[in-house]
Amino acid sequence: MGSWKDMLESQPIISKMVINSIVKNRVSHAYLFQGDKGTGKNMLALLFAKSIFCRKKQNYEPCEQCSDCRRIESGNHPDLHIVQPDGASIKKEQILHLQKEFTYTGLESNKKMYIIRDADKMTANASNRLLKFLEDPNQDTTAILLTENSQAILNTIRSRCQVMSLQPLNPKILEQRLIEEGLTEANARLMSTITQNIQAAIEKSKDTWFAQARKIVVQLIEMLQNNQEEVPLFVHTQWMSHFQDREQLHEGLDLLLIWLRDLVHKHLDDTASIVFIQHINKMEEACMYWSLSDVTTYLQATMEAKRKLEQNVHPQLVMEQLTLQMQR
Ligand SMILES: [Zn+2]
């Protein structure tokens, strides 16, 4: 359950547009909300519905207490229909059923609304059926189509909708969402740095390969500072056997970049910007070994290593050169 206040924070532009249409009583017949998983399409659609149906709303903010709000939240409102894929797709019968429901006037008001989740998953027949439905709108019907993949929506459908794009989440908000999803603060901080997609972030946080990758990066740094003579063997065995292809190696180097940027923040006493918050003690130590100018040099060397990988230099050679550059 979210409020417009939350929504305005995470999706200011689109929220203002929707609120404006509610306040000015200029709600369109059809909307298409497009945006990545986790950007809040569903929450936006439900809030929209509550603001339309709630009879106790304050200005545009629904009360969340009345029976309209509660039935929308639980998916049982008689004048709000939600269609979602039945198995892999949304089938023609589902749209026909929806259409049939809409031949009756609103049960409790004369307004009706329907939400089609994953609208790109409609079969061709379902899409054509919906198109006919959209071409012949009832007075007080509002359609909200949700999709992560708007390219897969028929142009003829899209052109009948007011298309609105949800923005990728800003890292701070994503981090907060991830904490609400049960991730630790440290995990949430890191995941929101490497992805903008909430689902991808949750999956990555459970990925044992990635957890091991983090450990290896931290070990490499410690070794570069304390046991330089062991670095070549470590790179040869541990590092190369874990980061087996270019894509994995890029991920490893990205983690190294985050760590080095953290050291820059630490040197500048900007603790709030640090990503690896669980390793702040190690960073204090690291700052004694590596000056700010060292860290800057290593950051450039790591970015150069990523470029070499792109140019098909052999991964092991890339790592050997990089770790050599990072030894004083
Ligand atoms: Zn209400």
Image (cartoon, rainbow, N blue to C red):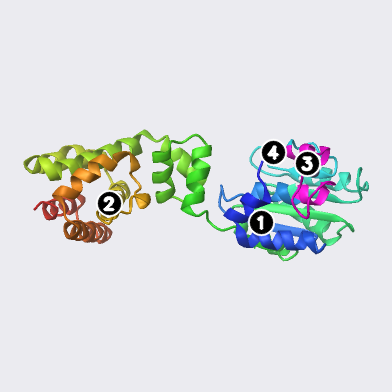
Which of pointers 3 and 4 lies earlier in the amino acid sequence?
3
Q: Nearer the viewer, mark 4 or mark 2?
A: 2
Q: Amino acid at mark 2?
A: Lys
Q: Which mark is residue 266?
A: 2
The quarter of the displayed image where residue 142 is located: bottom right
Q: CA distance from mark 3 to mark 4?
A: 26 Å
Which of pointers 4 and 1 lies earlier in the amino acid sequence?
1
Q: Which mark is residue 144?
A: none
Q: Residue 299 appears at what percent x and percent y?
A: 23, 58
SS at mark 2 in the image: helix
Depth check: 209 or 216 in front? Answer: 216
Q: CA distance from mark 4 to mark 2?
A: 51 Å
Mark 2: give few (<14), some (14-19) or many (20+) Cα within 10 Å: many
- What residue is shown with label 3? 69
Mark 4: give few (<14), some (14-19) or many (20+) Cα within 10 Å: few
Q: Nearer the viewer, mark 2 or mark 1?
A: 2
Q: Amino acid at mark 4?
A: Asp
Q: Which residues are magenta?
A: 49-73
299 displayed left or right of 66: left
